[in-house]
Amino acid sequence: MVLTIKQKVFSLKESFNVMDGEGNPVYEVEGKFFSIGHKLTVRDMDGGELAHINQRVVSLRPTFDIDALGVESELKAHFTLFKQRYTLVSPGGDWEIAGDFTGHEYEMSRGGETVATVSMRWFSWGDTYTLEAADGADALTALCVMLAIDCFNADTAAAASQASV
């Protein structure tokens, strides 16, 4: 299953459109207008809530709680120098997520098997990702993981720009 995740640029809150491989809208993602930490909701095109992503504000390392179709998971960032690494602790088996140095390519695996791959477009208006899930059943969870990683990357970029002032 192929999904394209496109950030809405002119929005006061975090907002994404998610399309299938043919460009048809399948999900809408909206964040809270004002909240401490990131809080995103994934809805189907009929407005039904499918998933929630909540950032834990008080934790030693960046952590997100993900509830996708009633399955609760926890995404934890690892501190590394050159690559981005995350672990999704899930009842169906833990996932390892590895990103490249630039944060544009990610691979999600469970038990050594690839669950999904993600590529970020280099030159686009707003963040745009292409997610390819090996199994359609894992696509929603993989989408939630990528949205959480996007939040983490946005926080890191904001902190870096503040440090350089």
Image (cartoon, rainbow, N blue to C red):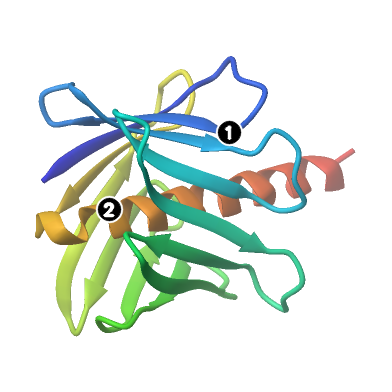
What residue appears at the point 40 percent right and 23 percent down from the top-left corner?
123
Q: Quadrant of residue 108?
A: bottom left
Amino acid carrying mark 1 in the image: Glu
Q: Earlier in the sequence, mark 2 or mark 1?
A: 1
Badge 2 element: helix
Q: Nearer the viewer, residue 165 or 28?
A: 28
Amino acid carrying mark 2 in the image: Leu
The CA span between labels 2 and 1 is: 18 Å
Q: Which mark is residue 106?
A: none
Give the x, y percent position of residue 68: 36, 60
Give the x, y percent position of residue 146: 40, 52
Lateral position of residue 25 relative to residue 22, left or right: right
Task: Name above or below for residue 57 compared with residue 146.
Answer: below
Using a 10 Å C-alpha cutoff, classify the residue at mark 1 as few (fewer than 14 neighbours), some (14 to 19) or many (20 or more): some
What residue appears at the point 68 percent right and 49 percent down from the top-left corner?
155
Q: Answer whether residue 113 is visible to the viewer in this image.
A: yes
Give the residue number, with chain letter if any, for mark 2. Answer: 140
